[in-house]
Amino acid sequence: MEDRKMDSLLMVRTVEQFQQDFPRWLINVHNPVELWTLLPSYIISQVFCTVGAFLCLGHALYRRGRWPFLWLGSVLSGLLIEGCMYFSPYGETIWFSPTVIDLFGQRIPIFIIFVYPFFYYQAFWAVSKLRLKCRWSEHIAIGLLVVLFDMPFDMVSIKYLHWTLHETEPLLSERIYSVPWTLLLFFAVTTFTFSYFFHNLRKWMDHSTHNRWASGSIRTELVVSLGAATLSLSVGSTLFLAIRYPLHTVFGIPGSAVVIGVFIAVLTIFWKFDRKSNRSSPLSQSFMDHILNGYIVGHFILYLGLAIAFNPQHAVSPGRHQPIGNCRNITSLSADLCLDTFNRSSYDFHCVAEPPNNGTYWYTICGTSHENRPEFLYAMSLITIVASLIHWTIHYDFAVHHKAPTKGASKKLL
């Protein structure tokens, strides 16, 4: 029985055969043991992110106020972003390997929804401790932190075939360690706008309190959570295009240069206004706070560990992938994968008897070794060190102000 299930997972299917074999629209369930034998790093990543999301939920319920609504809003944001990406009328651009629970015709794994509250909540929690006077720099800091969380997550996930990207989509063509530059800018901008609307919608709707984290009425907070998720996608996408289109499409500036330039500019803005922070005294932190602070550092250590422990060449990913096209059919080249010309540094077919035929939609791909493994590990190590120092500084490095000596007390000059 188990062998038949595994054979079903590894068999080749066209789009029509896939729709016949997986007719359920809402949910599909796979055996985690089978998936572990193919992509163990993927299982570990899913469990860690899901646990992280529910740890953030527990922390939000413990702190109360607006924190639970922040968690809810980030879940809604994830649903909208992933839904728009996978149900786009312009076609598919990303294909996830099968997970234990997949939704909507196996297009959205349930764990990816929990990545958003994990990243968003951790970013908001960290930035709340900076006590920045400039709200714009606060929104910038949240966007930058989410990109920092996402970078090692995407580097490992894409290289180790947790998912694959459209190989001929111009928007995803420029990449850094397998991660498209445009995705980094997109997530930074949408998180920036989510932070802006999450705080300002409540301020515009409810003037009864000046405490930004004190909860208003449930109705107001629910409207704000939904509004922040919805507006962050629409306004964020517009802002993303307003930045990228004229610079890249009109003036021909490489996408990498555009993204690096934007990040340097906003980092400079943040550094300038961080000089005016109210952060001057130590904050009391609970046991739950310390657990949350340590878990996000563990996020970076985990993906560095996965990169060290696992060889991407051993990764095997059956499932939905970019449809195989006919290289002679010019009209299909932009949408389909041409086996004669695709980039084999991402994956190949060395672990299967023969490559898939034209028209294949469900097939098995095989991971490839790093082009320069020491460089990849160096980049992962650098991100881990920088991220750990940033979070130690935010959560524990406070300037302690001692009380002034009482009148008449002796003074010692050093």
Image (tube, rainbow, N blue to C red):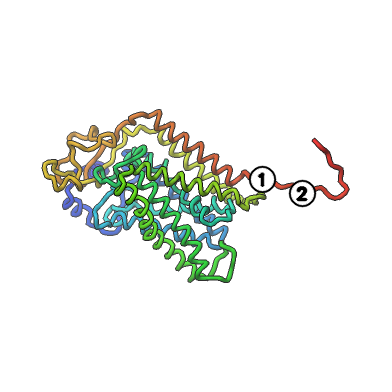
* C-alpha separation, residue under disc 1 versus residue under disc 2: 13 Å
What residue is at 87 percent from the left and 43 percent from the top?
A: 410
Residue 368 against residue 130 in the figure, above or below: above
What residue is at 20 percent from the left and 46 percent from the top?
A: 334
Residue 411 against residue 200 in the figure, above or below: above
Q: Quadrant of the C terminus?
A: top right
Which of the two residues, 125 or 98, is positioned nearer the viewer here? 125
Q: Whole-percent x and y of residue 372?
A: 36, 29
292 to the left or right of 412: left
Would residue 403 be seen by someone viewing this image from the given angle?
Answer: yes
**Total numbered badges shown on the rendered structure:** 2
- Element type at mark 2: loop
Which of the two residues, 47 or 37, is positioned nearer the viewer here? 47
Q: Quadrant of the N terminus?
A: top left
Identify the residue position indicated by label 2 in the image.
403
Q: Whole-percent x and y of residue 151?
A: 42, 42
Residue 102 against residue 176 in the figure, above or below: below
What residue is at 38 percent from the left and 33 percent from the top?
A: 310
Identify the residue position indicated by label 1 in the image.
399
Q: Which label sits on residue 314?
A: none
Residue type indicated by callout 2: Lys
- Give the farthest residue toward the right: 408
What residue is at 50 percent from the left and 66 percent from the top?
A: 202
Residue type indicated by callout 1: Ala
Q: Residues within 10 Å of mark 1 (few under 14, many from 20)?
A: few
Would residue 5 be seen by someone viewing this image from the given angle?
Answer: no
- Element type at mark 1: loop
Q: Residues within 10 Å of mark 2 (few under 14, many from 20)?
A: few
58 to the left or right of 379: right
Tell me whether circle 1 and circle 2 mark residues in contact (CB < 8 Å): no
